[in-house]
Amino acid sequence: MPTKDPQTTSEPALHAGTTVAMQQAIDAVVWGTPIVSFDAMREAFFRDAGCEFNDIVFLSRPADWRLRITTPNASALYVLFMFNSGDGPVILEVPPAAGAGLFGSILDAWQVPRADIGPQGEDAGKGGRFALLPPDYKGPAIADAIPVPVPTYNGYGAFRVIPDDASDQARLRAIALIKKLRVYPFARVAQPPQQVFVDMAGKLFDGIVSYDERFFASLARMVDEEPAYLRDAEMLGVLSTFGVEHGRPYAPDPAMRQLLGEAARAARDRFVAMAPDEGSPYWAGRHWRSPSPVGATTGFTFVTADGLDRTARAMMYFLACAPPARLGAASVYLTAFVDAEGNELTGDKVYRLHVPAHVPAKQFWACTVYAAADAAFMRYSPRVEANSYDTTIVTNEDGSVELYFGPEPPPGHEANWIYTAPNAGWFTMFRFYGPEEPVLDKSWQLPDIEPYGDVH
């Protein structure tokens, strides 16, 4: 446990008509969102994948709607493992990034990145052995390993493996690279166990937070498992009044359960309302936005000179997961929640996006759609993304592309259509992988999304 921490920045003043207890419970949801998001993914890892700590979940094909985590892409092959250092250090063996791109991060239970792997990581893309050390580890240094102190017992690794191209041969090379990963207890270093790999391609992996009474059951589980920070003492005191306390069984009565469920839903509604203004405009006069700088400038601890920015942290983990320890030149992500007229995007309408020619991305570009209500792929979506890997997309004579969004494809534009659920809000993320100078210096610009008509 840290001996000294900055104070937590204050939450917004009490809203009119909100009781003190309700506001405190909403504040608790804001505070607890990162670790509850972690627990939601961990529960999916156990429940949906049937895994145990140190097993490795991967996708042998790019994701479809069944990968339910916050704002994934549908281009890379994902790799995820959960670890727990309660019985001692955990070893991660990473192969050299050969045959496919490999990058990602090792994160603690609060989703603070503790180390990166890949070309921008501690292994510089050459592979290596990482020792994931438990809180306040006092044991000897582990030979031939990169030490990664993790201040929580639980944590996870989230990696992306990017095939060289869209061919089956490139995909198989990427899978072969995944199969070289190893995760095991340091206590078994002399004879590591057989590595378990579980392919979740085409299977439901539901790691999205439940913003209802289940939120506090998850929060209670994590508060019981993890060390406390001094900066969180006031919040932990408030949580104890709701029955959330280390070493105490969580058993709220019906009235308390109802209050906490309402608070979780109210906090979720606040996140949804705030999301369109998250970050800042990337190009003057356009509605594409870059992420809030608070995470990146604090190493995703969200501890600023004024203390812990709980609201910025909550927004980050409502909208995303698994940030890197070091932001490199690997990608640029831009989001749009509104159309060219400034109106929020909705499944009641059909929209068009003109993607100019010569997108400045060395590897590829991708445009992905998410539900505004939970920042996940839309359930049952037949198509969640369009990207430059896709050879079925129709390209204009000048190399530009027209993308269409709506519950049904406009006639004649089926190849360039991305699904949006009827009567539901949505947003999109446009990613540049291997961004080139024209996007970095903003000389190449992406137009706003334009209304194309109503749904018939």
Image: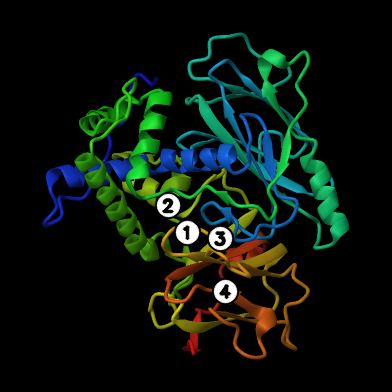
How far from the left and from the top, in percent, is residue 237?
22, 28
Characterize the local packing of mark 4: few (<14), some (14-19) or many (20 or more) Cα atoms within 10 angstroms. many
N-terminal-most mark, 2 or 3: 2
1 sits left or right of 76 in the view: left
Give the residue number, with chain letter if any, for mark 3: 333
Q: Residue at x 85, y 59 (%)?
A: 168
N-terminal-most mark, 4 or 3: 3
How far from the left and from the top, in percent, is residue 347?
46, 77
Q: Say whether residue 97 is visible.
A: no
Q: Name which quarter of the figure residue 145 lies in.
A: top right
Tag 3 secondary structure: strand
N-terminal-most mark, 1 or 2: 2
Q: Say whether residue 310 is visible.
A: yes
Give the residue number, with chain letter if any, for mark 4: 419
Where 190 sits versus 60, above or below? above
* Mark pair 1, 4: CA separation: 15 Å
Tag 1 secondary structure: loop
Of badges 4 and 3, nearer the viewer stands 4
Q: Residue at x 15, y 55 (%)?
A: 15
Q: Could you tell me if the residues under marks 1 and 2 are in contact, i.e. CB atoms within 8 Å?
A: yes
Of badges 4 and 2, nearer the viewer stands 4
How far from the left and from the top, in percent, is residue 226?
42, 25
Numbered badge on residue 230 = none
333 sits left or right of 285 in the view: right
Where 63 sits versus 193, above or below? below
* Mark pair 2, 3: CA separation: 16 Å
Find the residue positioned furthest to the front: 254
Where 365 sits versus 208, above or below? below
Q: Name which quarter of the figure residue 400 lies in.
A: bottom right
N-terminal-most mark, 1 or 3: 3
